[in-house]
Amino acid sequence: MRVIVPLQAVVQGRGGLVLGSLIPCALFYFLQFYLRRNRPSSPPPPHSSASGSNLPELASIHRSLSRSLLSPRGSYGPARLSSRGTAVARDDDNPYYVGLKRCADDPYNRSTNPQGFLLLGLAENRLSLDIIQDWLVKNWKESVLLDDEEGELSIQGLATYQPYDGSMDLKTAVAEFMGQVMQGSVSFNPSHVVLTAGATPAVETLSFCLADPGDAFLVPSPYYPGWDRDIKWRAGVELIPVPCRSTDNFSISIAALELAYNQVKKRGMKVRAVLVSNPSNPVGSLIDRETLCGLLDFVMEKNIHLISDEIFAGSTYGSDKFVSVAEVLDAESFDKSRVHIIYGLSKDLSVPGFRVGVIYSYNENVLAAASKLARFSSISAPTQRLLISMLSDRKFIAKYLTVNRARLHDMHALFVDGLKQLGIKCASSSGGFYCWADMSMFIRPYSEKGELKLWDNLLNVAKVNVTPGSSCHCIEPGWFRCCFTTLTEKDVPTVLERIQKITKSN
Amino acid sequence: MRMYGEEHPNQQILSRIATNDGHGENSSYFDGWKAYENDPFHLTGNPKGVIQMGLAENQLSLDLIQDWMKKNPQASICTEEGVSEFKAIANFQDYHGLRAFRKAIAQFMEKVRGGRARFDPDRIVMSGGATGAQETIAFCLADPGEAFLIPTPYYPGFDRDFRWRTGVQLLPIHCHSSNKFKITHAALETAYRKAQNSHIRVKGVLVTNPSNPLGTTMDRETLRTLLSFVNEKRIHLVCDEIFSGTVFDKPCYVSVSEVIEDDPYCDRDLIHIAYSLSKDLGVPGFRVGVIYSYNDAVVCCARKMSSFGLVSSQTQHLLASMLGDEEFTTSFLATSRRRLCRRRRVFTEGLKRVGIHCLDGNAGLFCWMDLRPLLKEATVEAELRLWRVIINDVKLNISPGSSFHCSEPGWFRVCFANMDDKAMEIALMRIKIFVYRENDAAVPAKNKRRWDETLRLSLPRRFEDLTIMTPHLMSPHSPLVQAAT
């Protein structure tokens, strides 16, 4: 009754009708005016794990949106990005990237900034750059970009167009380097090499070749967080994590792959490849020969590809010997045309700034397509020239690889022992720049939420950036990837002290 | 191309992108390159070979770059003087790029525009050459199936760079010689409406200024028309200003960056510039592409995508030093422009003497040559027939207008900045002989038919054969490099 009476007044009375329509209209316009005036100019509340972190990039998106709304000509709405562009611009919440950004703003330095952030979240090797610098000092004449005499090393060969997928000289040098890295167990053919500006475009380019948008790759997890960006963003390929367990040191299980394959098929998606890293990132373990054969059998049976990211092949330090999928292919009679290797110089040669990535494939069609796609990410000519010179000094490379491995071994041992003293055990690993640490006893609750809480405390209280297992799609909470190659021996006690501050309070 | 399944267990299934024609290498633009690759001109080694006039490369001022590098060894980490920087540079992979590098690029872009526009180093985003810049911009602004309008004639590489992996379409805005191929508001509207009628969503307009292949700069009025159009339709404007440093004659260069300074009503979120050092500095091998956007979200998105095409830190370090040397950049730009101006004049005057005209141009590394009088009929087929004669018999690789989507047959782009004076002389001589022959042949009609029968590009038709022959064919090979080796 109470509702009907005013309505009746509105419907029956002319004055009521006028008021009845005027008032809602007025309210509507006032609401619009109010909203427009008070449109938020600050970003939405950040994710809790990124507490305190300033997200200037998101803020400026809102600023630009409101500016265009208020412009006199902007009557149709803001200038929109593509939907994939918007998704990429917003993709800031992953702790992997949040942590990296905090460190970049305030990096630790033992002498100049001892309170800064300790960067244990970036797999970068600073242990052996001095060896390379020494080589340059002694050999700058060989590596120089320009020759004084007229000849091959003039500006002509340096500044002008090169083959998009790298010069044959560099391909040859890189193929030989890969052979040295694998300690002579396998040799690589330069004409199967496509060079790109880093392993990031190598992985993306290969994804564009092997899959259509909406297709899927099976990826044993935990896996390198960067792939979520490199493979999904523009190539539009879905990554299906195939969980591995701590009970068997996160080894790949063919049975689990089989299960995942069938599940994906049921969803109507097409699996195009299995993607693995060997040595594993983030675990650091090596894939044994038996498993490699199992993988090759699996992909052959399903008529799909196998992508093996072997970017840390030269950074092994354990007692286990690294076996490349190339070695298994050479020895056994598997179908080579479905196997592709991703490699690069960023890790093993410690030169991530130079941007050198490799797609190594036995498939002529993939090579043909990838070499055309390489035009979007070619290696800079001066860098090609420097590396041809450096990699051709095989004696130096052999010495560098040996010394680097020894240093990795020592730093790994020191760090893992130190963590053990704090009651933190690591998965058994033989390669890579990191250890895979089990901090599950320090997280509350035993869930991703608890893990991110610990990560947040480590980052914002202890100022130690590590990568939480959830960023790597690890199914068991509490695991963290801790890189030790940006540290010196003297930094290790500092790191452990800071970690202990947090773990003690937990 | 699609599933083979169990019937062909050894057939590896590749993606659509890997197996379609999106790479654009089947275009006639690249056919000429193939002819050059098979028979490259060399002054002493192969004087009857094909002269490469289809590659827009600036080799006239590389000596200046070389001199600078020799005088500034500290800029390179491979020298005694510069090696102390090695560790920091080799380790640097931040996708923001070296601050000094961005500052130097911004400075250089300002200098190219005579200081009439300011560039913020924090908006400089790296990419894998201009190729990578165009692709990244397309990824940021448009979804698959959406379109950009582009005035014809345009650089064939856009068909690949802007469309191949992005799935974005390019729809032509037809321009005509009657008004010197200027972009008109009517043409813009026509193109836009046509897209709408086909239910294609237009996300922006892509222009090149200075124009490739025309060799002309856009006047202020046209830029204002464009700005007004995109603001009205709420779509983006992408300006490829890769040849901005090659403006060697009047009228003075006007960049979109200058015009928006004068227009307070222009929504800057719609404006984006693609740039590179490949043409202005003549260093395509360095792979330096730049995206400069006035839209914060685009800067953010493009910067993240720059991981797929970062500039080598070694190169960044070198260029930070080179482009930070104001004295050098001022003198380089002046000298380069002077040499380009002179070279163009020599070429166009040589052409004029045999009755061939080019569109009046004041920029770029090429001329837009008018061979319409030599066409028997105003069709694309006639143009391609003439072009095959020029490749096979005159032995010059020039690019037919149809490969640039020009709506009028008979125009050809001829590059003049990638050869020395002697090669230029020989090219002009060959053109002279050809024109005289054509004029003689014009009298007896049956001679004309003989030309037709001999017209065949003597190359295998199937693309696969070509890739097997020369897998690296489609990477441009600089003719002067060939001459030296």
Image (cartoon, coloured by chain):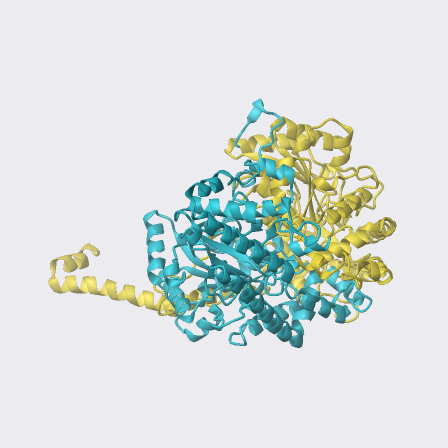
Chain colours: A yellow, B cyan
Along the viewing direction, whichever of B108 and B214 lies nearer the viewer: B214
Along the viewing direction, whichever of B238 and B303 lies nearer the viewer: B238
Along the viewing direction, whichever of A239 and B417 lies nearer the viewer: B417
- Residue B224 placement, left or right of A90: left
Count of numbered tags: 0
x, y percentage for residue B22? 52, 44
x, y percentage for residue A81? 46, 57
x, y percentage for residue B474? 60, 47
- Residue A76 placement, left or right of A82: left
Along the viewing direction, whichever of A55 and B258 lies nearer the viewer: B258
The answer to whether one can see residue B7 in this image is yes
Question: What residue is shown at x 80% (from left), y 51% (from top)?
Answer: A391
The answer to whether one can see residue A277 in this image is no
Question: What residue is shown at x 49% (from left), y 59% (from top)?
Answer: B354
x, y percentage for residue A343? 71, 45
Question: What residue is shown at x 77% (from left), y 52% (from top)?
Answer: A388
Q: Residue furthest top?
A: B7
Quarter of the view holding residue A280 = top right
Quarter of the view holding residue A431 = top right
